[in-house]
Amino acid sequence: MDVSNLLAAQTAKFQPTTVDKDIPLDLDVGFLTVTDFNPPDEESYASNLEDYLKSIARDGIQALIAALYALPTEKSADGPLVQLPTPTTMLPRAKPLPKPKPPTKWERFAAAKGIQKKRKDKKVWDEEKQEWVNNWGRGGKRRETEDQWIHEVKANADVDFDPVKAARDERKSRVAKNTRQQLQNLARAQGAREERDQRKADIEQGLATTRTSTASMGKFDKKLEGDKKLRGVKRKFHPAELSADREKHLSLQVLSQLDGDTKRARVERSSGDDVLNVRKAIRAVSKGKGGVALGRKSVNPKTAGRRK
């Protein structure tokens, strides 16, 4: 007797053990899982934990095997197989759902006009060749004008007019137009995404500013659901009781900082455009001779030789 026949015989002789519990076990044969909602027995749990856990696991395995043997089997080279049903347990996703892409300009227009999208066939029937040919691509129906051996040319066409080149240029212009529209749709979607991200960043920055506007930098404020912990927001508080030397040192630091701010403001005021530079003015009026020469020049010559 081969292995497959032996397994079939054992399967035929197998009689599943029924597991009776106050709350029926929840079986999901598709995932091969068993969930026991019965409350634990406190006496058995406290007296011998290992044996109690083994008995719980044995009951679950027996119920799962009985459910597997109840499924229809099929023969294979490795022995009888069963097709597991569709799982019924909803498992959480490992990653979030992908965000929907923003509609393109054509999709918005089609939705407004009620235009339904029709899928184009890859193959079309060629009456001349009496066969199915590609709609586009190499040897496609759309390139039939370029590949035909005779062309109709208008009477007023130029002497050097090439109908094959004209058909090829028209096809390439259509391809370039489609590519340009596709790039515009991508740029428009990227702009909308960047605008949304910028708006989100502005809102988060505003919330962070309001949260850190209190004296405790938001440490004792009530947290909202989903709020993230702000990074880099720290504030050091000095102890209420300080020694005399430490308090003197901190006060001198504050005074030195105020003194530096005062000097800096004085320098900024002196370097402003609205302040008159006296030396520069005297040099400009006396034409570089200085203030003494300017004083001599301003004396009246009629009264210069008189003595008091």
Image: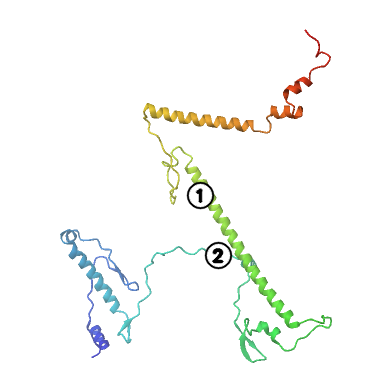
Front-lying residue, 139 or 68? 139
Determine which residue is flagged by label 2.
101
Q: Residue 144 is drawn in which quadrant?
A: bottom right
Is residue 132 among the parts visible in the rendering?
yes
Q: Dot 2: few (<14), some (14–19), or many (≥20) neighbours within 10 Å? A: few
On screen, 52 above or below 66?
above
Q: Quadrant of the N terminus?
A: bottom left
Q: Residue 43 is drawn in which quadrant?
A: bottom left
Q: Residue 50 at x, y = what percent?
A: 19, 64
Q: Answer with mark 1 or mark 2, whichever residue precedes in sequence.
A: 2
Determine which residue is flagged by label 1.
204
Q: CA distance from mark 1 to mark 2?
A: 24 Å
Task: Left or right? Give the position of 292 relative to 27.
Answer: right
Question: Mark 1 belongs to which amino acid?
Answer: Glu
Q: Quadrant of the C terminus?
A: top right
Residue 241: mark in rendering: none
